[in-house]
Image: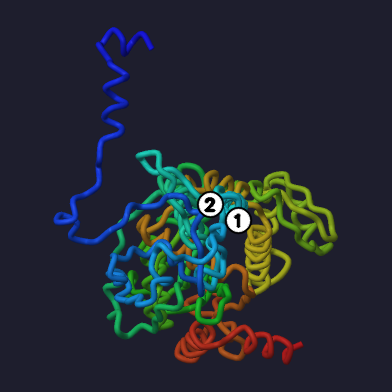
Amino acid sequence: MPRFDNEGFNPEKRNRNFNADRTVPEEENYYGFNPVDLDFNNRQRSNDIIRDNQRRNEDGFNPCTGENYDAPEQRPGHLDPPQHFRSETAEDFQFPSSPVPTRRQNFENQGKEKKKNSHKKDKRTKNGKGKLVHLSLGKQILIFLLILVLILIGSVGMVMGRVNYNDKKENQYIASDKLESSSMVKNILLLGVDARAGQNAQQTRSDTMMLVSLDMKHHCIKLVSFLRDTWVYVPSLDGEQRLNAACSSGGYQGVADAIEYNFKIDIDGYAVVDFEMFKVLVDSLGGVEIDVTKAEAKEVTGHPKRYGNVKLDAGKHKLTGEQALAYCRIRKIDTDFVRTKRQRTVMSAILDSAKHSNPLKLYKMAYNSAPYIETDMSKGELMRIAIQAVFCITGDLHQTKVPFEGTWNYATIRGNSVISINTEKNSQMLIDYVYHKSSDDIKAEENKDK
């Protein structure tokens, strides 16, 4: 061993040290321990106790167990014949009721857990720090609806920006607490004016006066036409006159004031459209389907100058914007009652077509028609009314006219052929129709009249 030789290692000195006496002097052996025997196979078990592993002193006293061995054969030097050491078994220990999983079992369990949670990955998104954040189904739906609302508001906002707005004015001729109203019903007065080029629309007589009631209580829409020749008190003229004369004397607000004053019903706002807007509205929807009679087709086709060179064929056809407008303007072949019915028929067809149209077509219709609309309602009011209309348009659509049956008669007043009415009775019937009658009530009355 060269390394030790270089360091001056002396093997003989090591041998002499090995033979040195290392026993503990008796006066210093305080615990009475014998040398430890590491030869386990030379030990012997007796009554499941490893006796040779229990240290005893020469007097036979075992300091670990407190036992005394009086007989010489019981002392350490007189042990039983040697027996090989028995290794511990499972019976020597008390195991828990559920075994501890092995590394292989842990590995298999982790694999199962990964498969179990793998479907959750698509429900997570990353936050700003790149960590995965779990989103519940409710939160996902909420986020989707929020995005949808923002898109709708943005789209509606673009349409609203193209509308013409007038300042809202209060009715000076009747107090608001004298008018019937409800938070569940919104009344919009739709005015159609027959203003030719170069004319001031507010100084012409209103050609169409229709109340559109959004009844959220009964989940339906109600259309009410006011006949233009109805003889009423016109506040802006401070006297009695035909109802459509209120527009030329008091503007659009004058018509709303006259209807509120005579029929005691609250109007939330008005919307004015002209002939051009009506054509754009129908064409944006791809036309409306109308059943045209022979007399109506002959009237329109036979008078090209009166109806703008429009031709109509008898039967059920999809009319263009120009054809639908001509159909609504027919007045020479029958009465004003039938004329307003034709107007409500076209309006009902427009609403029915809108109900079954896709959102893109509806947006196109609203966007193209907006510049031809004039209203005293604000953007916020229009937004709320549009939302309320969604809850009503899926329900039934009903229509009627003022004056009601049995409340009027033809008369000649001051040389004018007019419709004289019982104003108070019409007011009561209109309030009942708009605010109190359900779809079932109206259908029952319609079936009874047939």
Query: Residue 11: horizontal and vertical position, in percent?
Result: 32, 19
Q: Nearer the viewer, residue 109 or 363?
A: 109
What residue is disc 1 on? 116
What residue is disc 2 on? 123
Query: Residue 137: horizontal and vertical position, in percent?
Result: 52, 60
Residue 130 is tagged as none
Amino acid type, label 1: Lys
Q: Are marks 2 and 1 in contact (CB under 8 Å)?
A: no
Figure colour scheme: rainbow
Residue visible at 54% across and 58% down? 85
Answer left or right for 313 relative to 441.
Answer: right
Which residue is most to the front? 72
Residue visible at 43% across and 82% down? 263
Answer left or right for 165 relative to 40.
Answer: left
Q: Nearer the viewer, residue 415 or 58?
A: 58
Q: SS of the residue at dot 1? A: helix
Residue visible at 32% across and 26% down? 15
Give the answer, above or below, for where 424 lies relative to 238.
below
Q: Nearer the viewer, residue 23 or 84?
A: 23
Residue visible at 38% across and 12% down? 1
Query: Residue 171: horizontal and vertical position, in percent?
Result: 30, 72
Label located before the other in sequence (2 or 1): 1
- At label 2, counting other C-alpha atoms closer than 10 Å, the crowd grade (few under 14, some 14-19, many 20 or more) is few
Give the quadrant of the C terminus.
bottom right
Give the answer, above or below, for where 60 lies relative to 307.
below
Amino acid type, label 2: Lys
> Quadrant location of residue 90?
bottom right
Question: Can residue 390 be seen in the rendering of this structure?
Answer: yes
Query: Residue 138: horizontal and vertical position, in percent?
Result: 49, 63
